[in-house]
Image (spheres, coloured by chain):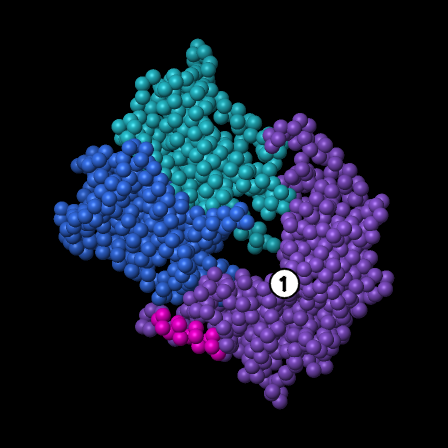
Chain colours: A cyan, B blue, C purple
Amino acid sequence: MIVEQVLAASVIMTTPILLAAMGGLVNRRAGIVNIALDAKMLVGAFVAVVVSSATGGWFVAVLAAAFAGAFVGYLFALVITRANANMIVAGLGLNVLVAGVLGFILSWVYDSSGTLRLPDVVLLPHILPQSLEAIPVVGEALADLDPLTVFAWASVAVLPFLLASTRIGLWLRATGNAPQVARAVGLPQNGIKEFSTAFAGFFSGLGGAHLALASIGLFNEGLTAGRGFIALAAFYFGRDRPVVTALVCLLFGFLEATQIRMQTAGLPPKLVGTIPYLFVLVALCLAGFRNQRRKALS
Amino acid sequence: MSDQAIAQNNGVVPDAIGKGFAFVFPFIAAIFVSGLALLAIGENPVDIFVLMANEAFGTERRIAATLSAATPLLFTGVATAICFRSGVFNVGVDGAFVLAGLAAAYIGFTLPAAFGVSLIPMAFVFAALVAAAWLYVPGYLMAHYEVDEVVSTLMLNFVALGIAGYLVNGPLLSELSGNNVTPLIHEAAHLPRLLPPSTLHAGFFIGLLMVIAYGIWTRRTATGFEGALVGLNQRFSRAIGISVPGAIILAMVLSGIVAGFGGASHAMGQLHRFVEGFSPGYGFTGMAVALLGRNTALGIFLSAVLFGALASAGTTVQFFSDIPLDLVNIVEGTVMIFAVVEISRLAWRRRRKAA
Amino acid sequence: MDDVTIRLGARGLSKAYGAVEANRDISLDVAPAQIHAIVGENGAGKSTLMRCLQGIERPDAGTIIVDDNEVTFTQPQQALNLGIGMVHQEFMLAPDLTLLENLVLGDEPERVSLGVLSRVDWGVARTSGETLAAQAGVTIDWSRRSASAPVHVQQFVEILRLLRRGTRILILDEPTAVLAPQQVDDLFALLRRLRDGGTTILFISHKLREVTALADRVTVLRRGEVTYQAAISDTDVDTIASHIVGGGDSSVAPVRRASNRSSVGASVFDVTGLSVPSIDKSHALHDVHLSVKEGEIVGIAGVAGNGQDELVECLVGLRAPGDGQVRLRDADITRASNTERRARGIAYISADRRHEGLAIDASVEANVIAGSQRSATLKRGYFLSAARIRALARDRLERLNVTFGSLKSPASSLSGGNQQRLVFARETDGDPSFMMAAQPTRGVDIRGIEAIHRILWDFRDRGGAVLLVSEEMDELLALSDRILVMSDGRIVGEVEGDKADPQSIGRLMVLQDREPEPAHV
């Protein structure tokens, strides 16, 4: 019983992080460290709730969330590519700006502070028949499966191919790996960076939509709770490789899903929550030590 | 990370003609964006801005509220600028500030009240030690192992929040009052309030002292001079005999000390305890302060007061006119983004297109 | 084959950067299917000429000829379209992509065109790679990550990439600088095969043995002008070398000023058995011995890239030697840090003024007092005194007559000569006993050169010891009391300053070049 619940919860908790991480990974492959994934998730969540309530359709809502995220991402990219802004400061600034704009809209348009409850919000459907719940271990997870979760894992399967074998994938990798080479062979570098950032926004928007529409059906200013940064931690630790990153996301999702249970087991959830970030620190240190050793050897 | 906009170095980089403009430009952008937001909700931006200016500086009490709101930003602004001018992209001031606040509060409520006023310096020193040690780690890793300081300090922020959140909900939780707060510190350890009933406290003067000390450090000390050169050109600095790793670690440690004082001041003067949500992003607003102030002492002071004014005016304007407080975040975010945009480059592009 | 006499050429090409004339009235003809070598010292104008030929730089005067027609390039793309492509010293391969990915990057074959979303047809890509490799007579493991491939293979791939994109005129910038001897042979075999297949090749090199072994014709540049052109069959290494180093030209040669001391003093700076292993792109040092005495300027002559940079860095403490000893007076400073060496009285004039000699964006004042910031003379009480800093800065600048607008203006606002004088003003203050001067007049105009030479003489006449590394033969002859010749990381000869002549030194410089090296076999 517990195993089934934990598994189902882990899968659900993983999806938003996974989506944002896949977007951020592609972005970083193109040479942009996207520190504003969280902002785009927030935008996605907000738009998803509003559109779902207004249209009564989850699919339209999800699509709108994704494009809203992509649009914000594109604007963000323009600041970096065309006006040469530092991507870290601009990213942190965007996080603050988006929080401000959403809060502003929330309190002005909806006259609420912090939380937005709208009538008739349609949640993500479960795509498999609920009778599957009877299957041991995986039953609950299968029954809870929603389209965005399927999409997220499908993207994990497809991204390696897209990156390896398509023209845009090759260009992306070249731009991030060796900008001077990309310039020398005449690749449209700015366009590639803008595309990849919009892509990251698209996926983060989806992640936000999942947060809002998977089960709770409302928007809250603190809804993302730093998940954009956990996604950042995931692809840093996964070294921008989709499958490894996805597994790291799954681990983070599992940690989140078991937080409550850990507390009853005497493990403080706040400390457990720092594990993703400690992961990155360890990964950074290992890479640093390895570089140093290589230098010392030669 | 070697963006010119970030490694602004006062004292060593000559005054550019555009410096004044560079200070004003992000604000023009912010006024424009927030003005749009106000127009969108059918308010007259000019009226609101005038109202806000009045609310921020109109009376002695309002000024006190503004300076009170500016106090933590003086510390975080200086802490950020110390690193930025040395080419160290430290975004971990927020985490250091939070841990320091907890450390100071811990001294303030665990040591016997009999220590009296001497609790204050003890708390400040302990807080500074904790924060300095905290930032020493990414500094050391950056100086000796080239570990990217942006990501390491960013991640450390979350770790700091996690640790503080754990302590304040567990071992250090107040038995008297519900959740997420520590016990109150002894009354003797409170920093004196300057203009009651305003919350403006003596920490403001300590913050001012930090800004002044920062100004002296940048212009009147060898290590301050060295930091600026390291921020500009590491190869040159090495050739001239400056220890680049030393300068990087020093910047981080000094930044930690100032952030630590800031956390202590906020705990001992403002809240009189540690609570979860101790810093609503003071460290990040501090980045905006440092960037807007172009890492100069005067600039940091002015920017801190400006952001303080926004925060205090935002709170009261919300009462009078239904203008959401979030306007403050809109302004802050816009300022951060436009503080790092290269205006010269934009202008140059336009000229080239015209030609 | 087409009926073209000049595949690529230049007529009266001139290009100046400020007061420095990088190219002056250069004319050049390269026939189709020929390997044409361009040789000259650093700063002789080779790279400017190449930049003009590629359309990266627009000449001030003169024209470029492609296939017998005059052309004007307004952007690099035009040169590319006419089939002009360059292989840079820093290879233009993305390290994390495979060799095959690098080969097709920017021009990928596709089965169905979907724009950027097209799937790259790796089968076709591989076939075209293998065809090219077969034509060039090389074998390449295409699925290898570029960074892990041997250097010469990376170079091959870069050449093949250019050929694949229609390059008919290949420009190679010192292609052998990073290669081992066996790899050089492989590269030359490839280049000859390409030439025989109709490709025209411009080959830039410092190594004269390679030039005579490979090229059909040679053009020598010196101080921005063509000083010599010949078919390889009509010339030899000595003749080319003498034109590279020049020196016979009395109108531009600076006047020599001998030491005013009757005899030089005690030894100040001694180096014994200094060795540095070669790491990736740096050059090794082998068992270097030298000593510099009080009141003496010792010059180091040599073709660029023969270990001079490494020697300089070891001596000033910016690089740790593998073996050997460095002594200043009686102290062993082999393991001393750069900071400690400076404190003991070593001055350093960096060859890279803009990046190491100066913090170019910092103020004149900051640049001229840098390094003294901890000195007690700048402090009043505990803190630095702005007045004392200003006074010291002015004092130093005035002593060497540095012309500057304001102490607060950036160092970049000064002319090249004044920038370098600023460096000297900083480095010579406090009477250091030893000065390491690397390329002290690089990028400085004639008047500035004279002033800097006077500074060096004065320093010597006050009893200072100078080690001077320069690629300017005239400068070495004018300044040095002794000249050591460096080749392949070794000191291969020594000549007394007043007995030195360009020809004998030039011969020593290329000595190692001509004789087979047992070390590598």
Q: Quadrant of residue C252?
A: bottom right
Kindly identify the residue that appears in the image at 74 percent across and 52 percent down: C70
Residue drawn at the location 71% of the way across and 34% of the way down: C125
Subunit under mark 1? C
Asked if residue C78 lies left or right of residue B4, the reply is: right
> Farthest top residue?
A131
For this rendering, which residue is in front, C272 or B344? Answer: B344
Q: Position of residue B291 (x, y in %)?
A: 38, 51
Image: C160 above or below B256: above
Q: Nearer the viewer, residue B3 or C429?
A: B3
Q: Which residues are drawn in magenta?
A: C385-399
**Can residue B264 be spotted in the picture?**
no
The residue tagged 1 is C16
Q: Which quadrant would residue A190 be assigned to in this image? A: top right
Residue at x-position 84% and y-position 48%? C3
- Residue shown at 32% from the left, 70% from the top: C382
Quadrant (top left, top right, bottom left, bottom right) of the N terminus of chain C: top right
Crowd tier of the residue under label 1, counting other residues whose Cα lies within 10 Å: few below 14, some 14–19, many 20 or above:
some
Q: Nearer the viewer, residue A190 or B91?
A: A190
Marker count (numbered): 1
Tell me residue C2's x, y (percent): 84, 45
Amino acid type, mark 1: Ala
Residue B215: in magenta span: no
Q: Secondary structure at mark 1?
A: strand
The secondary structure that most of the magenta stretch takes on is: helix
Residue C143 visible to the viewer: yes
| Image quadrant containing the C terminus of chain C | bottom right
Q: Is residue C388 magenta?
A: yes
Task: Give coordinates of residue B332: x percent, y percent.
Answer: 34, 43
